Amino acid sequence: MTRVPVLLLNSGIAMLDYRVPPGVCAPAGTVVRVPIGPRQVVGVVWDHGLGDGDDGLDENKLRPVQVLADAPLIPPPLRRLIDWTSDYYVANPAAVLKMAIPVMDALLRDAEVPEYQLSAIEPARMTEGRLQAMAAIGDHSGTVRELMMRANVSEAVIRGMIKTGLLIVADPMPEHALPPPDPDFGAPQLSAEQQVVASELVAAVTARKFAPLVLHGVTGSGKTEAYFEAVAAALRAGRQVMILLPEIALTEPFVDRFVARFGVEPAVWHSDMRYAERRRTWRAIASGRTQVVMGARSALYLPFPALGLIVVDEAHEMSFKQQDGVTYHARDVAVMRARMEDCPVILASATPALETRVQVAKGHYRQLELPSRFGGATMPDIAAIDLLQDPPVRGTWLAPTLVRAMEETLGRGEQVLLFLNRRGYAPLTLCRHCGHRCQCPNCSAWMVEHRRTHRLLCHHCGHVEMVPQHCPECGEVDQLVACGPGVERIAEEAERLFPDAKVVQATSDTLSSPAKAQAFVHRMESGEIDIVVGTQLITKGYHFPELTLVGVVDADLGLQGGDLRAAERSFQQIAQVAGRAGRGSKPGRVFVQTHDPQASVIRALVSGDEHRFYREETEMRRLAGAPPFGRFVAIIISSEEADEATAVAKSIARAAPHVPGMQVFGPAPAPLAKLRARYRHRLLVHAERSVPVQRVVREWLGRVRIPKGCRVGVDVDPYSFM
Ligand code: ADP
Ligand code: ZN
């Protein structure tokens, strides 16, 4: 008889020992079904238990595993990645395994699991559970299990809805077997500079060894074209490729470029896909049938059996950091996966993160550079507008210099982009009469007015209200005023200034689906749009040759909050949006509106002295022992009861161990003291790199009793200090 540890999905238990019945073959990586009490749970036979040795259960008491014959093996490098992730990020291994098997029914054969969708019938009897389920299901279809998870209701609710005809069997997804990508389909003529870089990348792929490569090229230099050559090399070698993008909105333009280069669409992977598509894609990747996957960070844990290359595009993007659940950083995990797979990883960026630059300086990562734009296009000219010297007309937000530049640009028939990283009309709504500020009932945050949809919206929890006529506090009518600008308000101003121009907003509200993003791209390309007003969504990946003027409405915005990466984030964001200007044959101009033209970020942008900016930032981090020279770990305590959150935070602080080289700050109420109706407290651990801080934190928190309604989250290398 063989005893095996099994890592369980969906369970607080994580790991238990089971027995493999005689004659059954279940090596590590095998997906199995096992009993826990009266329940059946899916898990994966693991290489080792959690602690050392077995879980102490008597051999004879062990219950048997049942092998899921249709499921693929979870490959060894992915198992090692799951181990590493749960150790490094102090995460429950079951939660990490769940990222590798996000669609449980993918483990079974498609035919066995019918999908359901909402029918059009009006239900006679409506329960609270059903209402909630219907809202959550919306347009989605899925298996019973998937709909349960989506709607967060019991199986009985879903079964009841099927019985009463509220849910009907969905049309099966058409099977479309894509032909494999063709590495020779549309190979471009590379410039000499690109050729040098591309051949280095190709060499790394053919060497089949771990190699972290930084592809540092200015915006418009052809980074994508260069790494596509590496993708082609992997395809020729019969290996699989994972391309990570920071934003789903970027996938459409990217898919078009992929098709132009390789003749077919790549498989895509993100959280908003149809369940049937997710299942099918997951299986096709596991079987090796799908060669190239382009996706959001969740693609990192897909079960590729023959991965030969990982690309992280716009690798500096902070959205690669997962903020809840398992709080991993996709860029760092990508490097780790490449190490486990023994293959190269390419971090492509115009503004590599400070952490990445330090790795290059230490000689751990190799940097390849594309210092000039493709096709002779020049880098845009960046100038600061001092808002104190050159102020906008009262009640408006665009300075006269910027308005004049817009006039000239539009006069030449070219396009303008105004960048403001704030959705909605105004970030604050205030009563002129009593001073009341409209706040979210669930969060310590203001409600943001969205005039387009006549709503007040909380950007933290999604709470929605109609814009009130009366002040909710004093009852006065028509006294509520919008304070400060959002994208909608800037668009309104642009329309007022240029009544003949076509003004369009580009935010996650207006480009909420890949199809809408694509439609927007076509309207830009056809020249139908004159002025775009957009958030950071518009700063990346797009290539519009007629766009020659970029205006940054508020360059100081990103510096608020003052966390350790604020200046760097501003620099990257503004450099990125500036990179949208003048990508074709016409030169581009950029104006940056600021109250502090002497700030080091602004000076670096205007002078183009990126190296000096990063040198100074790096020195500051080194002196402070901040990442990457030291480590931070945030501990976030939250509860629906304010007192409970406070008490638990205090008892965690009291239990803090004394470790040389480690300091604990807090507890203190989080800057976002209330979020989704939960009160939040934070502790911040600061440790030298020599301290095994993950182990220390794990043991420390293991000693504190956490009441049931209280959640304790650990965020290693936090990017948010809210
Ligand atoms: P980056 O990712 O560095 O911003 P891109 O890869 O998007 O740059 O390239 C910018 C533009 O130049 C794109 O439209 C791309 O198709 C074009 N381009 C770059 N290199 C070549 C090449 N060798 N041949 C043809 N077009 C190219
Ligand atoms: Zn809220």
Image (tube, grey):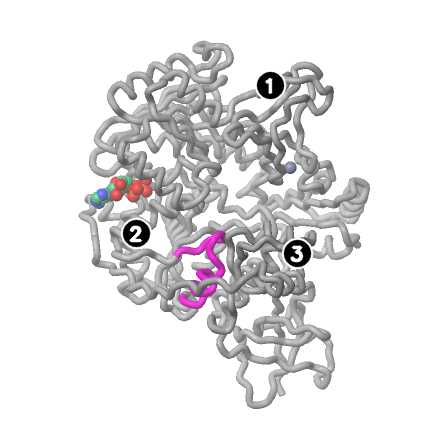
Res 305 seen here = yes
The amino acid type, in three-letter code, at marker 3 is Arg
User: Is the residue 265 above or below the residue 10 in the image?
Assistant: above
**Helix, strand, or loop for circle 2?**
helix
Q: Nearer the viewer, mark 2 or mark 1?
A: 1
How far from the left and from the top, in percent, is residue 665? 70, 39
Residue 282 among magenta residues = yes
Are the residues at dot 2 and dot 3 in contact (C-beta closer than 8 Å)? no
Is residue 380 shown left or right of residue 465?
A: left
Residue 418 among magenta residues = no
Frontmost residue, 221 versus 494: 494
Location of the N terminus by quadrant is bottom right
The amino acid type, in three-letter code, at marker 2 is Phe
Instruction: Please report the residue visible at 40 percent of the width from the left and 42 percent of the height from the top.
Output: 516
User: Cα distance, mark 1 to mark 3?
Assistant: 51 Å
Q: Which residue is mark 2?
A: 258
Location of the C terminus by quadrant is top right
**Helix, strand, or loop for circle 3?**
helix
Frontmost residue, 676 versus 721: 676
Label 1 residue near ligand 2, CB within 8 Å: no
User: Is the residue 688 above or below the residue 671 in the image?
Assistant: below
Q: Which residue is mark 3?
A: 695
User: Cα distance, mark 2 to mark 3?
Assistant: 43 Å
Instruction: Please state the quadrant of the image where ligand 2 appears.
Output: top right
The amino acid type, in three-letter code, at marker 1 is Val
| Residue range (magenta) | 268-284
- Judge the density around disc 2: few (<14), some (14-19), many (≥20) Cα neighbours within 10 Å: many
Specify which label sits upstream in the sequence, 1 or 3.
Answer: 1
Are the residues at dot 1 and dot 3 in contact (C-beta closer than 8 Å)? no
- Judge the density around disc 1: few (<14), some (14-19), many (≥20) Cα neighbours within 10 Å: few
